[in-house]
Amino acid sequence: MRKHVIITPAALLSLLCSQAAIANEQLTDNTPRLTALSHATLAIEPGKTLTNATLLIQGNKIKAVVKNNDIPDDAFVIDLTGHTIYPGFIDPFTEYAIEYEPEVEETSGPVYEIKRIGGNASNGAIHSEKQWFNYIYPDKEQAQQWISNGFTSVQSGYLDGIFRGQGVALSLADKKANDVIYNAQTSQFMAFNKGASIQDYPQSLMGSIALIRQTFSDAKWYNDNKNKTSTSGESVEFNIAFERLADAKKQNFIFDTANLNNQIRAAELLNEHELSGSLIGNGREYAKLAEIKSYPFSLVVPLNYPAAPEITDGDSEREVSLADLRHWERAPSNLAMVSNAAIPFALTQHGIESDKFWPRLKQAVERGLSQEAALAALTTDAAEISGIEHIAGKLEPGYMADLVITDGNIFNDGKIVSMWLQGDEQQVINRENALLDNLYQLQINELNFDLTIEQTPKLSGSLTSGEQDISLANLNYQSGRLTFSADLSEAGIKGISRFTLWLDNQGLRGRLLDASNQTIPFGGIKLEPILVSDKDKSAEKAPVELISKQTSPNVAYGLSAQPQLEKVHIKNATIWTSDKSGILTNSDLIIARGKIKQIGQNLRTPSGYSSIDATGKHVTAGIIDEHSHIALNGGTNEGSDAVTSEVRIGDVINPDDIAIYRSLAGGVTTAQLLHGSANPIGGQAQLIQLKWGDTAKEMKFADAPASIKFALGENVKQSNWGDAFTHRFPQSRIGVKALFSEAFNEALAYRKAQADYKKMRSSERRRTVAPQYNYRLEAIAEVLEQTRDVHIHSYVQSEILMFLRLAEAYNFKAGTFTHILEGYKVADEMAKHGAHASTFSDWWAYKFEVYDAIPQNTCLMQDKGVLTSINSDDYEMQRRLNQEAAKSMMYCGMSAEDAWKMITINPAIQLGIEDKVGSLVEDKQADIVLWDSAPLSVYAKVDSTWIAGRRYFDRQQDSVAQIEVASERAALIQKVLQSDDAHKQGESPIDLTEPEWHCDTHFNAWQQSATGAL
């Protein structure tokens, strides 16, 4: 006979808990359990719901979904009429239940090598050998922060290092590890932050990216060659970290990215190696949706809404950026925009307090996130990212009985009333508090009273009836019973009455003891909130109106759309060609399809072209800066090792840097972004065009010759770095030369080994260890082969001569000596070698090695036949390079035309792009600047700046933008001031501001600030 029990919601939890308690008292329980959760609404999966249906559970699995409530006779039935059952939610990014403490050594200075223990990697930030299921120890108390929000399982790993090891998916059930692990080997966890590693390398974001790139290469090499023998008869050393990356293309990677630009970088890096996986989001995805969607990766997004900016007075108001104000307003809309862009995503509690999760998710639903998408992010998509889509995330036969039971729609006003983990029910709403924070109606002696009980946090309450409002005293709540006293004299009950109330499966019951000690029993009901129709709800809560703009980049003066390709006829201008044509007066220039179409006088305006009357104005080529450090994230130096030629500035371009826009306003169109001067052989440089509003990838100058930063002088030998920095070679100028020679010799040997291997017969290659691809030596070999230009930081004549002779000894040409403040002393030798110079106009005496600097340096070098340019090496100076060039006219009588060439065609030649930009010549790229007066004047202002025929700066548009920015800021500040406390709560914004750096910034100061930015 069927055991059929009807259980009210009020008694559901206590009954099931008592069953569980009885079962737990037994040593074993082999009784087959068949439970029917009947007459419920079943959210089978996103987009598929059944009403008035039954879920059959046997053991820890779902046995069946019964649509017609035809329940087996032997089932234990729980009537869930009016309740909804959801699949248990899944958090794909946690550190739950990892019982692990890494050994951290005390260090007093830089650490260049770590202990090699158990076949580990040579870098302390690589832990890919870790398989975190080995360290699982379930923690009932820790699990509650997820269970209380409806989560039943998580993906977990220890979040430390760059390669963090292989995650594990597990249940949050209070059982031993063997019983909770759903998938022992899930995604490889990764990040850019090296974490607790004591090793100096890497110190920068570009260093982390280079290490990742080299590690993937090394792992492939290792697994291809581990069973082979080298030419010297040695076998490949065992490396468990590389072994665990053997099948990288078959694994998934989950990449913690910290910020939006890093999210793009992680996607690019995974894509580069043809890997699959997911990116940990940051809540700002709305700002770069198209770029994110161009990569084939899902997201795991935290609900880390920012706190409202603190605005107390005019000073604090000025400190708040427009970008922060915009993000405060738009952050709750992020998920809706990600969903509308059809980017798959899951949700995580990582980085926020668990009690903020549901209020914020409901806020996201209010902002347009569909309930179906929200459910998918918590179930099916989260299950796939966690590698458990075959057993979790749906209400289907064979899936784990991980359930969330709610009273009402959880995405609206519904509340979780019960949680099931692996077929066992857990109590999450404390029934001991069932009476609190509710409204009841009591019937006493045929009188009706409304009873309000609140705990905020002090217990308080009142009885009301008509005009009567009776305060309560001596409130106490214990063991499910509420006691208090009240004076009901006006209601016909004399004296002070003492009340006792409790809630059981019959509802609310109670008794009072009046002044004559007479006991009066009474009953009551819970008063439900007044229901309103959907129409009423929409009228009650109007859609949130967003007043902020969304631009690219999403900062002040960002663009709402990329500039259009223009067809323009500039008339009657003075044209500075930076070419043999010289300076042309009263001349015209026509651009179309991104190129200079025609230059001449009295040209006819072609049909469909706009025209600009430039009478009294001047037109020049766009300014080119040979030495810049703007627009970088995560550090300008990889200052750890003495040779870091593997790192790439191109990996860390920051397209959101306002310095790009400001430089455009100064007529700059092209800049070489250089690594810093912390080491003799630094990182690979990146030439960019200042395409404000475009992506980092699109800013890179297409087909520009490769280049690299070398350095001489005080910085590379760690002068003034402090007493801790006395161990890295070199520590002297003579040591710098020795290091160059050693690096060059090693690169030559590297190339020879590659060539020798290629000469082997195929049968011999199959038995022989292949040369290991080395990004560091690859770049140096390219220098020796003259396929990568050297731009070398230099000051004193002795070192300049040393490097010239060294380059000649190794048969390559030194490219451009940058800074070179003693270049005038060795100009003859430089000219003979064919080296170029890029210098400052008038920097001197700021440190010992520049005491001999003179402002006539440019003229003296140029007079000796050295191609010379002026560079900035400074955020602010870059936007006034026209004035820096003009200083040579004052100091040493340089002609205006030659002075102008020092910031246009001369740097173009030094960078190998003179065939495309740097001068105004027909068929060259239309990088042009329109000035309101002679460009070398201190009073000259830029009217417009074009790159490849697109106008990226216009002074009239900028004037409009200034007003719009001020207006938007004022409106958002008013919105902040008028918002309620609930909308002001959130996480404090992370300061990702990059330090403004040039080559002679004190390195330790940079290191501290750049490390914080990671």
Image: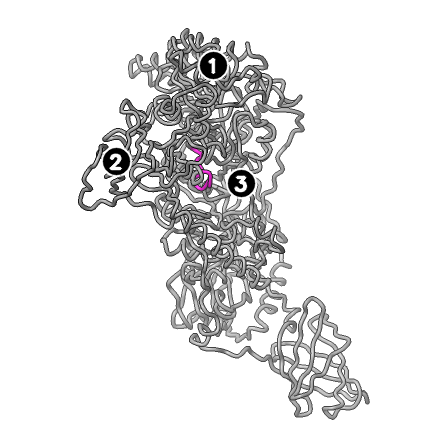
Distance of mark 1 from mark 2, alpha carbons? Answer: 38 Å
Viewer-closest of 15 and 965:
965
Q: Is residue 590 placed above or below 455 in the rendered structure?
A: above
The colour scheme used here is one colour
Q: Residues within 10 Å of mark 3 (few under 14, many from 20)?
A: few
Find disc 3 in the rendering and name its residue: 993
Q: Residue shown at 55%/65% (left/top)?
A: 418
Distance of mark 2 from mark 3, alpha carbons? Answer: 40 Å
Magenta stretch containing residue 657, yes or no? yes
Distance of mark 1 from mark 3, alpha carbons? Answer: 35 Å
Magenta stretch containing residue 400, yes or no? no
Q: Please, what is the three-letter code of the amino acid marked with disc 3?
A: Thr
SS of the residue under disc 1: helix
Q: Please, what is the three-letter code of the amino acid marked with disc 1?
A: Gly
Q: Which mark is residue 823?
A: 1
Does the residue at mark 2 contact the one at mark 3 (Cβ under 8 Å)? no
Read off the magenta span. 651-659
Find disc 2 in the rendering and name its residue: 589
Whether residue 597 is visible here, answered yes or no, is: yes
User: Would you say 803 lies left or right of 272 here?
Assistant: right
Q: Which mark is residue 242?
A: none
Report x, y in % for residue 461: 69, 76
Mark 1 or 2, nearer chain start: 2
User: Would you say 669 lies left or right of 113 here?
Assistant: left
Quadrant in the rendering for residue 669: top left
Q: Please, what is the three-letter code of the amino acid marked with disc 2?
A: Leu
SS of the residue under disc 2: strand
Viewer-closest of 462 and 234:
462
